[in-house]
Amino acid sequence: MKMASNCVCAVSGFWVVFLVLLRLGCSEGQRVPAAFVFGDSLVDVGNNNYLPVSLVKADFPHNGIDFPTKKPTGRFSNGKNSADFLAEKLGLPTSPPYLALISNYSESYSSSPFLTGVSFASGGAGIFDGTDERYQQSIPLTKQVEYYLAVHENLVQHLGSSGAKKHVAKSLFVVVIGTNDILGYSGSSNLRKQHTPQQYVSLMASSLKDQLKRLHNYDARKFVFVGLPPIGCCPSQRNQDKTAACKEDTNSWSRMYNMALLAMLKGLKSELNDISYSYLDTYTAVQNFVQNPSAYGFTEVKAACCGLGNLNAIVPCLPISQYCPNRRDHVFWDLYHPTEAAARILIDKVFHGSPQYTYPMDVQQLAAVDV
C-alpha cells in the first residue's frame, strides 16, 4: 500500500515542517504526542471488523452495551477496554484501528492521519504467526510491525525525517500480547511435545525481542509492556475443572513467560540504552481482583457476565447469550476478557503504579522521560 504524497519542495519544506511541528505540540493535558498499540483482543478497538473471514469479532451485541454509543464497536468488552483508559490517562484520543484509517485514506490529506497514534491490535493475534490459524484470520505481531513501518513512512513524508523521528521517539509504544500463544500451547499436545514450557516461553520472549528491535530501528524509544494475567483464572479455563478452580498449569506458564519477558527487557535495555520501558504486572493486579474481590467492588470472579452454560463459559458472548444486569460486579465480561470495570481499575493501578505493579517505572513516569 502506497500512503505517500510528494515530498515538500526543498525551498519551502523547512517552514512547512516547522509550522506542522508547532501545531503538533502536546496540548494541555496531553502527556505524549501519540500512542502506537500492538496486541491482541485485550486492546483491539475494531481492527478485526475489517478482516472478512475472521472468526474473532466483537461487532455484534451484547458487546458494547455500556460503551458511550451503546453499540458494539469491535471491542471485546461491555464498554471501553484498557486501550481506551490508557489513552484517557495520556490525554489522547483512543488510537484508532489501523485498518479503519487506511480504508478511508487519501493521498490528498494535508496531514498524516496517524499523528496521535494508531492501533494495530487484533483479536486472536500472537507473538508467533501461527496463533491465528484456529481463528482463520487475525493480524499477528510480525504483520502489525510491518503496518507500523508503513505508518512511519507516512509520518516521514508529512513531517520530514527529523520531525518524524522526534515525534515518534516521544510517543509510547504499547505492547499487549502473548495470551493467545499460551492458550495455543495449552491446547496443543504437539507443541507440548516439541517444547518444554520454559523453552516455549523463551521462544516467545526472543521472538518478541526481534520485533522490538525492528521498532527501535524506526525510532521507537518508549515502551509499555503489559505482562500476562493469570490466564488460568478466566472462565474458559475454570470451566475445565469440576470445582471451577483456576487452571494452575496455564497460570504457571503465564508466570514463566512474565519472568522471561522481564529478563529479555533487561537484556534489551543493556543492548539499546536509549530505550525506556514500563512493565505492568497485570498478573498480580488481576490475582488481587480474584482473591480479594470486595476490595475492588466485585462480587463475581469465576463466571463470565455474558454467555451461556456453566460459568457462562460453554457458549461465548453471542446475541443469543444472556448477560448479567450489573456488569460492574464481574471481573470477566466473557470467556476471556475483563469487564470495563476491571479494565478501568487495572489502568488506574498501573498508570500511577507502585513498585508492586510497575517496573522500573510507572506509565506516567515513562511518559515524562525526555528523549
Image: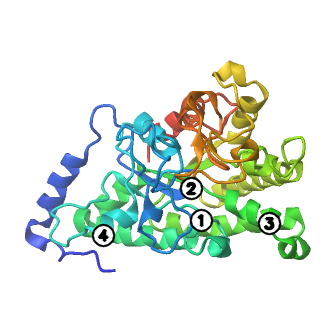
Q: Which mark is residue 185?
A: 3
| Alpha carbon distance from label 1 to label 4 | 21 Å
| Alpha carbon distance from label 4 to label 2 | 21 Å
| Along the viewing direction, whichever of 112 and 194 lies nearer the viewer | 194
**Which is more N-terminal, label 1 or label 2?**
2
Callout 2 amino acid: Ser
| Alpha carbon distance from label 2 to label 3 | 18 Å
Q: Vertical placement of 295 versus 143: above or below? A: above
Q: Residue at x 33, y 51 (%)?
A: 116
Label 3 crowding class (10 Å Cα cut-off): few <14, some 14-19, many 20+?
many
Callout 4 amino acid: Ser
- SS for callout 4: helix
Q: Which residue is mark 1?
A: 125
Q: Which residue is mark 2?
A: 41
Callout 3 amino acid: Tyr
Q: Which residue is mark 4?
A: 103
Q: Position of residue 77 (x, y in %)?
A: 53, 45
Label 1 crowding class (10 Å Cα cut-off): few <14, some 14-19, many 20+?
many
- SS for callout 1: loop
Asked if marks 2 and 1 touch (Cβ < 8 Å), the reply is: yes
| Along the viewing direction, whichever of 221 and 338 lies nearer the viewer | 338
**Which is more N-terminal, label 2 or label 4?**
2
